[in-house]
Amino acid sequence: MSQKDKKKFDPMTYRIEYFNEMIRENTSAFFTHKMFTDNQCCKKPFYPRQTIDVLSKKKNPYSIPKQNGEIRIVSCDMAFAGGKENDNSIFTCIRLLPETTTYTAQNDNGIGRQIKQGYRKVIPYLESINGGDGTKQAIRIKQLFEDFEADYCVLDTRNGGLIVYDILAKIIYDEERDKEYQPWVCINDDSIANRIKTIGALPVLFAINASQKLNSDIAIEMRTALTSNMIDFLISFNEAIDTTLFNIPEYTSATDVDTQIFYEKPYLETQELINECVELVYEKKEQTGIIVISEQGANRKDRYTSV
């Protein structure tokens, strides 16, 4: 990109400079900045459909074709109170790509063996909502689920999450998109599944009501995925400005900030995720060995929880 082209986007400079700041790390941090930057290799963001495209039945130009064996998840950490002092609801789109390793042992007569390594996790999109009632957020979950062609929704049912489940378990009308969504049913907790029974409900919702032990397991698994390079995050915002974003005509020709932000959002949210995670501190319980992850002061961990 020429210097002349870059100057056209001087209004965005404040965002670039903000994310150029050094991220503070402390001795109690469970995650380091390098753990994340080493995994920032995804150059293909996902963008949900815009309302005008849905109503005109236009195919999403930013959809990502599914790979064989791929599983897709929309993972939701819920919050309802608005304002800067409160948490956000975070919706994360996650691609799970099956991976295997082929090797040949000496006694195999040259025949290769495939060893399953599990799933590589790719995070092509995150979205935050500050405040909003349960119906509004449930509709947004359904929109993302449909646009992302997801297979499952993972929902944190604490802190009012059950209210959202009850809405998701019913037929919902989306006035914005002029569409009715099929109800869902919980697949891993009978007590939640029995709250509302709707004929034709899709078995796609996995409820999370995390214990201290499960939270510890999640933290360890997250760190393992980072150190083993089995989780891919979007490239940095600065790199995206110079590469992928300038391949999007709607972005380069945008004359309004809202359009620019729409295309920048996945990268900005990814950076916020990294900022949150490296600020988290941990404590290891002596008797149980359980890892307790917590935020400091006014910091948040809602993006970490969603991922």
Image: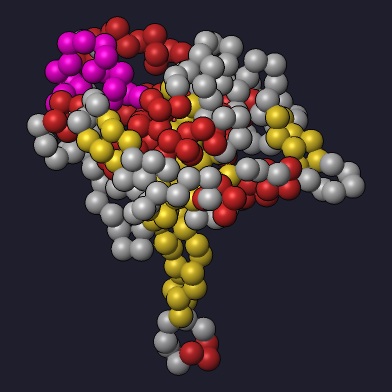
Residue at horizontal 35 percent and vertical 48 percent from the top: 150
Drawn side of residue 141 relative to residue 298, left or right: left
Q: Quadrant of the N terminus?
A: top left
Observer-nearest residue: 262 or 248?
A: 262
**Across the whole image, how many numbered discs are drawn on residues?**
0
Q: Dividing the picture into quarters, in which one does residue 156 lie? A: top right
Predominant SS of the magenta segment: helix
Q: Dividing the picture into quarters, in which one does residue 248 lie? A: top left
| Image spot of residue 32 (x, y percent) | 62, 34
Drawn side of residue 120 relative to residue 174, left or right: right
Observer-nearest residue: 24 or 225?
A: 225
Tell me if residue 90 is in the magenta stretch: no
Drawn side of residue 54 relative to residue 106, left or right: left
Q: Is residue 127 visible?
A: no
Observer-nearest residue: 137 or 52?
A: 137
The residue lying furthest to the right in this view is 287
| Image spot of residue 304 (x, y percent) | 56, 34
| Image spot of residue 26 (x, y percent) | 71, 26
Chosen colour scheme: secondary structure
Drawn side of residue 278 relative to residue 29, left or right: left
Residue at horizontal 75 percent and vertical 37 percent from the top: 292
Give the extent of the magenta segment: 249-265
Residue at horizontal 50 percent and vertical 55 percent from the top: 187
| Image spot of residue 60 (x, y percent) | 18, 38
Tell me if residue 255 is in the magenta stretch: yes
Q: Is residue 145 above or below residue 114?
A: above
Residue at horizontal 85 percent and vertical 49 percent from the top: 288
Q: Is residue 113 visible?
A: yes
